[in-house]
Amino acid sequence: MSHLDSVSSPKTPDFSALKSWIPPERLITDPGEVSVYECDGLPLHKKSPIAVVLCKSEEEVVQTVKWCDREGLPFVPRGAGTGLSGGATPITAGVIIDLNRMNRIKHIDAENRFAIVEPGVINNHLSDATRPQGLEYAPDPSSQRACTIGGNVAENSGGPHCLKYGVTTDHVLGLRVVLPDGQIVQMGGPEIDQPGYDLTGLFVGTEGTFGIVTEVTVNLIPPPPSVRTYLAIFDSLGLACRMVSQITRSGILPAALEIMDQNTIRAVEASVFRAGYPEDAAAVLLIETHGIDDSLADEEARIIEFAQECHAIEFRTANDEKERMDLWKGRKGAFGAMGRVNTDLYVLDGVVPRTQLESVLNRVGEIAEKHQVTVSNVFHAGDGNLHPNISYDGRDPEESHRVLEAGKEILQLCVDSGGTISGEHGIGLEKSEFLPMVFSDEHIDTMIELRLAVDPQERSNPQKIFPDNRVSKDGGRQKLNKVPQ
Ligand SMILES: Cc1cc2nc3c(=O)[nH]c(=O)nc-3n(C[C@H](O)[C@H](O)[C@H](O)COP(=O)(O)OP(=O)(O)OC[C@H]3O[C@@H](n4cnc5c(N)ncnc54)[C@H](O)[C@@H]3O)c2cc1C
């Protein structure tokens, strides 16, 4: 039984107050139509919401949150629904508050290098808007053509270039938030080094459990003066991993170090994201360096040496922007390409020390064999952030069960290897039961106390992050995950 089955349905809500101000086309209650929102990018958990409210302004968010409070209903904030840990998946009797339509870039201050945006702005629309002024928004999840800045904030998202530039939290300067009781608060702002508690830092990564972000102030950076992109090709996945360790140990800090294994290469090459990767290779390592030409030339010489030492069978250099985009096309489209392998995809997200990449990936292969599941690996190797992707047919309950067993074993392996259970996709519903793998009871209790201090009624995205019905050390049942009345 999943979290989602464990809560019984409450009374039918009174929609009349909502209907008095929200236009009918932005309130969805029809059971067929709300089912479109039954999951995010993790198809293992599904549940229809009782209603979806498509908000266009902060005022509408406040009104909806207050209505939920009056009706005793939980709500789930939702951006583009590309999350991979079930964060935006509805819960029983839950109302989806959809932020997609709050998609205005409100202000760009090029001189002071910041922008103020609504949460529904799509990640790469922001850089498209700031590039003419010589600035970019650095965090670049592979889903950046669809995911929203609000979702990125909630998940503290990373991306291929976060190796050099840092993840979302390093680029968020301030937030405006509607708290679970409808109060609006401003945290941080464009000025760097705010006095007092870093509430912005605290909020980033809370996965929608602290309320709804309605405005984000982000840091902008100038694009690098020069960029070089390479593809090292290997007949062994282990050797590709060794080259990653060599590069990082040398002190070179590439902008990106991304590995794709043979299953991924083959899926990519059979798809519209075809990038010319050799299909008989065991692995490819995509390397990108950013900086001034002189230092890049020096780094290039050393990177070629490492490729030779690690017995790369081929080493390609992108000679112009088109060749560079072609090399990235396959990597950016890799998850999409896996849609060809089977009907469903479970994207795992674990972290291991970089030096453990080779041995952990060997064990991942053994786990896949044991559970008879197909795993393709495409990952942010420079961060040790693995994404073993399990392709499966979700209509087959027995296969789905094997997928879950394999996933759990892989995440336990990451922890046992000195790593952790999420690098960037969050805990959500997917890994809430695995939290004790990495945190003690005391740690979890402290996080729960913090969550209840912000949201004592558990209105905002309940049943996410924390284990269900956890019994604390003293035997008392935790206050979390109450049945909404
Ligand atoms: C093909 C593919 C590639 C991906 N690559 C990456 C990657 O490289 N790096 C990475 O980190 N992730 C990646 N992801 C995962 C996903 O895109 C990110 O987690 C992203 O930040 C989710 O944004 P979203 O707008 O889709 O949020 P949603 O999925 O809608 O929501 C995600 C979470 O944020 C909460 N939320 C959304 N908006 C708000 C808001 N305004 N206020 C408060 N809470 C909110 C939701 O309740 C939920 O808990 C990938 C996903 C896919 C499908």
Image (cartoon, helix red, strand yellow):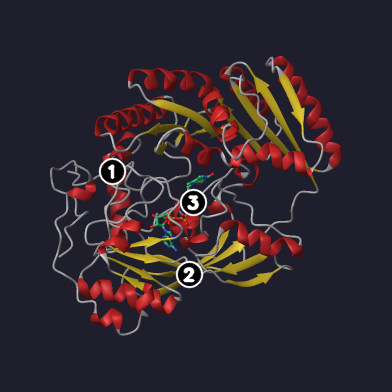
Q: Is residue 484 visible?
A: yes
Pick the front one: 349 or 5: 5
Q: In the image, what residue occupies the spot 14% across and 56% down? A: 8
Judge: label 2 CB < 8 Å from ligand 1: no
The number of callouts visible is 3
Q: For mark 1, what is the residue?
A: 442
Residue under numbered circle 3: 156
Counting residues from the start of the chain, the first of labels 3 and 2 encountered is: 2
* Cβ atoms under marks 3 and 2 closer than 8 Å: no
Q: Mark 3 touching mark 1, by CB under 8 A?
A: no
Q: Could you tell me which quadrant the C terminus lies in?
A: bottom left
Query: Closer to us: mark 1 or mark 2?
Result: 2
Q: Mark 1 or 2 closer to N-term?
A: 2
* Crowd rating for badge 2 (residues with CA inside 10 Å; few <14, some 14–19, many 20+): some
User: What element does badge 2 sit on?
Assistant: loop
Mark 3: amino acid? Asn
Distance from Cα at disc 3 to Cα at disc 1: 24 Å
In space, the residues marked 3 and 2 are separated at their CA atoms by: 21 Å
Ligand 1 under 8 Å from disc 3 Cβ: yes
Sequence order check, earlier mark of 3 and 1: 3
- Give x and y (percent) for residue 228: 77, 38
**Label 1 – label 2 distance at C-alpha:** 40 Å
**Front-most of residues 163 and 364:** 364
- How packed mark 3 is, by other alpha carbons closer than 10 Å (few <14, some 14-19, many 20 or more), is many
Q: Residues within 10 Å of mark 1 (few under 14, many from 20)?
A: few
Circle 2 sits on which residue? 101
Label 3 or label 2, whichever lies nearer to me, is 2
* Disc number placed over residue 314 in the picture, else none: none
- In this rendering, the answer to whether 419 lies above or below 48 is above
Amino acid of disc 2: Arg
State the residue at coordinates (39%, 73%). 61
